Image: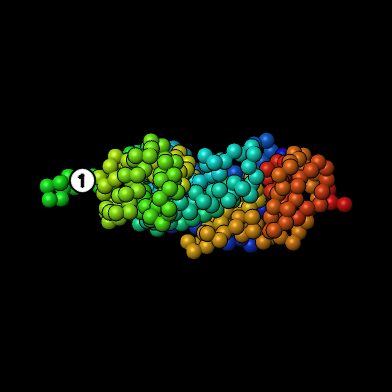
Amino acid sequence: MDRRTREYLQGRFGDYYRSATLSLPPAADAREWGHIPFTDGGTTMVRHQSLLELGELDAFLAGESPRHVYFSAARYEDPATRGMDEKGWQSADLVFDLDADHLPSIDPERTSYEEMLRACKGALLNLVNILHRDFDFETQVVFSGSRGYHVHVRDPSVRDIDAAARREVVDYVRGADLDTEGLVTTTVDHGTTRRVLRTDGGWGRRVHERLIALAADLREMEEKAALARLREYDRIGTGRAETLLTAFRETPEAVERGNLEAGGPGVRILVEQLAERVVAENGSAVDEPVTTDVNRLIRLPGSLHGGTGLAVRRLDSEDVAAFDPLIDAVPERFTGQQVRIEVTEPSEAPVSFNGGSFRPTDGEHVVPEPVGVFLMARERARKVRET
């Protein structure tokens, strides 16, 4: 990044921070703070700081105009001590990071920024659903300012758990290596042993709900179409399909109970495949190293992301579904302004903000400031003199 571009961005970031509303985490004084300044030739983080050292945070950010701002998920006795072992670790929030780059459905080379954000919203809604429904956690959702979201859990019951336990939570929300047998329990009824799908919660409940929905659909279909639908599943041939359909139509109460004996071996084969689909559609590909790192630094809500110029936005639960980063995370300070830039890295993919769109072609352009800041922050354009 050349000097004129860097000085322009730092100046505009400073303008933003002079009127920004920041969201401090609980126990802010017990957390380590860090930032990455606008410097020539790199992105070196300044860390091992406490709020006591920084002073008034609003004044510090307005004066320093950093490129990125972070605080630790952990709470410490002495957060400013440089040695991690000497900080006196007390506890850490359970933090999840969702980035579009990590989603199995996304090819970063071929997917537009807008499409990445849309896909990540789906993964976010899945994650929040699991944390609320399966763990009964209260969550704090934050748009990262770039390609994804952070989700904070500050429940006292999880602040003390170690990295191994946090990894188990990650595996659960991902649905990683879901053991179908683990979703099944054995019951004895009048001397008869039955294998029953767990229906009381978690992934078992989700698979059971899918099984009930499938059985209901099949009961409404003509027999020929219903059998064809069942044969779409692997290892479900004509015989097994007929047995399954008979069970679904004649003993629907068995499906309601999750009875895996009704319908013969075909129902267990069917449940295995339904479980795979449920995980693919409802799991959330969170970034494991972020959650398992009990000393992690995470972005400060209200700060700007130095790679996009978008605001790191804290979201209320009722606002998550409707949130549009390309509108709601655009700093008001940058709207209504234009800037002259030279595109140095052209692209066929448009850049869209506030309902407008710009395709970055070679040469000089006068563009809305959010577009210009985005391209300059990503080092795809440079600032040129205004004429």
Label 1 Cα neighbours within 10 Å, binned few <14 / some 14-19 / many ≥20: some
Q: Dividing the picture into quarters, in which one does residue 42 lie?
A: top right
Q: Position of residue 240 (x, y in %)?
A: 34, 40
Q: Position of residue 334 (x, y in %)?
A: 70, 58
The residue at 37%/52% (across/down) is 215
The residue at 36%/43% (across/down) is 241
- Indicate the amino acid at tag 1: Arg
Q: Dividing the picture into quarters, in which one does residue 324 lie?
A: bottom right
- Identify which residue, 36 or 268, lies in the foreground: 268
Residue farthest right in this picture: 387
Q: Quadrant of the N terminus?
A: top right
Q: Position of residue 232 (x, y in %)?
A: 44, 41
The number of callouts visible is 1
Left or right of 225 in this view: 114:
right
93 up-or-down from 346: above or below: below
User: Mark 1 falls on what kind of element?
Assistant: strand
- Identify which residue, 89 or 207, lies in the foreground: 207
Quick check: can you spot residue 184?
A: no
Left or right of 129 in this view: 102:
right
The residue identified by callout 1 is 194
The residue at 61%/39% (across/down) is 108
Q: Position of residue 66 (x, y in %)?
A: 62, 48
The colour scheme used here is rainbow
